[in-house]
Image (cartoon, grey):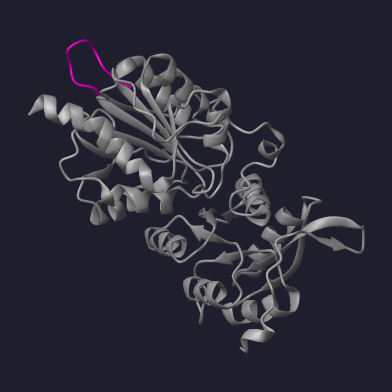
Amino acid sequence: MNEGHRPRPNLLPHVNNKNDKPQIRVLIVDDSAFMRTALSRMVGSDPSLWVVGTAATGAEALQKIVSLDPHVITLDVQMPGLDGLATLRRIMAEFPRPVIMVSSSTLKEAEITFDALEAGAFDYVPKQLSSVSLDIVHIREDLIAKIKVAAGGRNSGDRLNLLRKPPRAVNPHAPQPAQTVPALIALGVSTGGPKALQDILPTLPGDLSVPILVVQHMPAGFTAPFAERLNELCDVSVREASHGEVILPGVYIAPAGSHLTVDRQTNSRAVIRLSDKPESQPHVPSVDVMMLSVASAFRSFAMGIIMTGMGSDGAQGMAAIHREGGLTVGQDEPSCAVYGMPRVCAEMGVLDRVVPLSQIPHEIRQATRYRKTSAS
């Protein structure tokens, strides 16, 4: 296609002349007629969203992008002919705009989804398979929220957060508290997290002296292949956390569907506990549940890191680590895919340092090198 004839992406909502309400234009791409109908109904149920069209193939999707100029595209991972990943790469090269992948929780599709995130997809939502039908109703809220954030721009964060006062400034070059020598790091992340973790964890040394517990909001079936993928990329050991295992230096990814906490008795090693309690949490695993446990068990010897994501999960946990005297670090706004979770913590005044994503490994190495030196 001639460069001069490409539609210019416009992330501001159009106006639907039918009701004169500003709406976000969405194109639904899926080879299943049932999924196209179901997703269209879910997206169309929100008055701020407008399904401007659907496509059954990647080739059809590329044609409709030209004629419909959607703000956001939902894209099936597995399609005949031009599959989801190939279609995504064409979109990013020819008509760059936010794309949300829709993926089944199978090992193959999970791996393709992570490839799609590396190729430029904004995020993904799962579609769960059952023995009789596709159970997709549960993804409605998540899908709508991600479409709105994607359409608002990569650093928009939660729309409610945009109306709040700017967070308290923190000097990224300020010296770290002298008393902080972490024995364990608790890291929480959500939207934009898979790509962010793939950027920073491979830069950590293989002889990292402390454990890192990670809660990344993910659907069932995704955390195990994600941990395996990270382990292949990293010098430091990365694994999906298991109930009852002793926590040693390395990275532990909390499994989807289970809260991760630590059990530590005086003068004994800490072990991982997995549970579906408490049930009141909107996210399982929950960053707050994990960090509150770490703060209670390690007190001033804990380090908390909060990264890109929607909502406020992790705010209570980071506040607890800060209150106990542990070191707290937040990702800065420009480097976040979604500046929601770190912003809430910054506004609460519970962050010792706010740094770009690329500087988070430095913060980890700087904080833990004292422990390595004292132990050697």
The quadrant holding residue 256 is top left
The span shown in magenta is 261-270
Q: How many marks?
A: 0
Outermost residue toward the bottom in this view: 2
**Residue sitting at 37 percent across and 40 percent down?**
255
Q: Is residue 269 left or right of residue 174?
A: left
The quadrant holding residue 95 is bottom right
Coordinates of residue 271 in the picture (x, y in percent): 25, 25
Q: Is residue 78 positioned above or below 188 on the image?
A: below
43 and 356: which one is in front? 356
Coordinates of residue 259 in the picture (x, y in percent): 41, 30
Quarter of the image with the C terminus in it? top left
Quarter of the image with the N terminus in it? bottom right
Can residue 277 be seen here? The reply is no
Answer whether residue 125 is magenta in the image: no
Q: Is residue 206 left or right of residue 301?
A: left
Coordinates of residue 253 in the picture (x, y in percent): 34, 40
Provide the major secondary structure of the magenta segment.
Answer: loop
**Residue sitting at 69 percent across and 77 percent down?**
7
The quadrant holding residue 266 is top left
Q: Is residue 175 positioned above or below 90 on the image?
A: above
27 and 13: which one is in front? 13
Outermost residue toward the left in this view: 376
Q: Is residue 216 left or right of residue 333?
A: left
Coordinates of residue 180 in the picture (x, y in percent): 29, 21
**Residue sitting at 45 percent across and 55 percent down?**
105
Q: Is residue 290 positioned above or below 83 on the image?
A: above
Can residue 299 be seen here? The reply is yes
Q: Is residue 369 left or right of residue 106?
A: left
